Amino acid sequence: MPALIEDYALVGDGHTAALISRDGSVDWLCWPRFDSGACFAALLGTEQNGRWLIAPASGDSADSTGAAAPAKITRRYRGETLILETDIETAEGAVTVIDFMPPGNGWSELVRIVVGRRGTVRMKMELVLRFDYGFSIPWVSRLKDDSGIKAIVGPDTAVLRTPVELRGENMHTVAEFTVSPGERVPFSLAYSPSHLRIPPARDPHTALARTENHWLEWSARGTVEGKYAEPIRRSLITLKALAYEPTGGIVAAPTTSLPEQLGGTRNWDYRYCWLRDATITLLAMMRGGYFDEARAWRSWLARVMAGAPEQLQIMYGIAGERRLPEFEVEWLPGYQGAKPVRIGNNAAGQLQLDVYGEVMNALHLARVGGLQADDTAWNVQCEMLEHLETIWQQPDEGIWETRGGRQHFTFSKVMAWVAFDRAIRSAEKFNLPGPLEHWREIREEIHAQVCEKSWNPALNAFTQVYGGDELDASVLLLAQVGFLPPSDPRVIGTVAATEKYLMRDGFVMRYRTTEFNDGLPPGEGTFLACSFWMVDNLAMQGRVAEAEAMYERLLALANDVGLLAEEYDPAQKRLVGNFPQAFSHVALVHTGLNLMKHEQEMARATGQPSHNGAAQNASAQTAPAHNGR
């Protein structure tokens, strides 16, 4: 059975990523890309679907009476890197397992080094390679130099090298070994296409030093300082790990089908690039001082946007692929029994009007932040607006990708307003050509329509859809995107109604799945990004103490290595949904920076010292989440 979602840590190399449980099992890894078939799929099934375990042979430690007790396990990332260190204490002694994936290798590789700390600890290793999402069993043979094994099936090859003696047992590769103080026992598992030569042997310890230098150099470029700097910087490292280095595309999560409700059917494949998620990730990177990543993403966006504006999709593959057909993997039982397991995502064909606003907002703020675009980018934007003018009054599937039919979602219309608003601002600020007066007329028309058709006097709130009586947390963004000021009574009323109807145990739901037909069985956790949006609203309304308390409660939901899933189940007190989730970490970054910026402004106004040290990068001051002002 797979571990709790919050019991996993992430390592990655800019091409793919692996999830490693607290007990030392690599239960998820897709090779060679984030969206390739998994060779370790125990996360969505059992160990027979593929995993790589390194753990104490006994699994026990001794308590104060000398009786056997479970091994004591603590873990952390080494400084500001993506190198995972897991300390294990048993009755025999103590070891540390170091896990990492070297970036820039020329091939993808997962390295594990067991370091002896105290005593002599008996360890075990079990490698179960099952390519194509746990289906294909490879043919395993020894390397000619007897340094390890090679496993091959169809298009895939993996090579395990280690000084430890390996043996085959029931279609598994296993080993036992001991580790003494100061001893270091390495394992290196590398991937290559089966028609190419296998990757050459490299010294694992040199690879470790190179990987550490890579991450420390990257982290040193960051500009975030202050009270919430540590979780923000960890989130930025996580977002960097979700970026596909060859193209600049950013996946929403490295996993598929982790359920939004334990045992439920709301299980989706998130190993693709949503324009919405990627645009707000770009802003987070800019605010954190990482402009190379922002430039890479903008280049990716320019490529995927190329072509007919009416063919713009809400999501793409990591290289810009347009076809992401969805199918179900019948041989995997799902995470703790949550079926179906889905590969691909049919939402790629949905109409979601808000992405136009997200893209236009991001490109505007990229210009403000100094990432000057060429004339072609502006021409494409103008073509996008021409098309948006013809479709903004249509119903769509909305930000939450509902499958119950198209409706006139409030947030979709608001973001159509944002698209025209940011184009106007870009044209005015950077002297770009365009029919500004015509755009202003459309902007005013959208604004008036939303205020008329989405406002519900009985609820004293903006509703999920035109003429509706249900709430939606996406309307918490009205003030952040500049549609209305935070002091507007309608914004204040909407926040109050959200607190009353959409909060569970202090966290925010997207909407009430029991009351709104989204085409799926009801039931899911609270949505972490929406909870961060509530924090922003509380701060904008001057309820700063409440905002900080809620933000710190949200930070406490992260696991021991600072990772968040998409949702949180207050009843089960567990993280749910795909993991780690870019949307959650982006919201954590933006909200934390907003709170620290608010503290700085209050300190300047009162003449009091701030806790936040150096001021943020200048571009960060001009790029609040979703806001073009």
Image (tube, grey):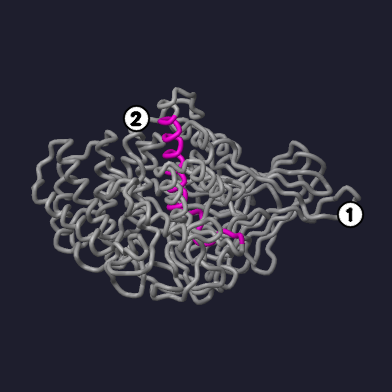
Q: Residue at x 48, y 34 (%)?
A: 219
The residue type indicated by label 1 comes to Ala
Q: Which residue is mark 1?
A: 67
Q: Percent from the top left, x then y, of residue 555?
A: 55, 46
The residue type indicated by label 2 comes to Ala
**Is residue 605 placed above or below 471 in the rendered structure?**
above
Q: Percent from the top left, x then y, of residue 580?
A: 50, 53
Query: How many neighbours does mark 1 have within 10 angstroms: few (below 14), some (14-19), or many (20 or more)?
Result: few
Q: Quadrant of the N terminus?
A: bottom right
Instruction: Please report the bounds of the magenta region as a residue range.
Output: 573-602
Q: Give the residue at the far right of this rendering.
A: 65
Q: Nearer the viewer, residue 538 or 20?
A: 538
Report how many numbered discs are placed on residues in the image.
2
Check residue 378 for magenta coloring: no
Query: How many neighbours does mark 2 have within 10 angstroms: few (below 14), some (14-19), or many (20 or more)?
Result: few
Q: Quadrant of the C terminus?
A: top left
Q: Which residue is mark 2?
A: 618
User: Magenta region, mostly helix, strand or loop?
Assistant: helix
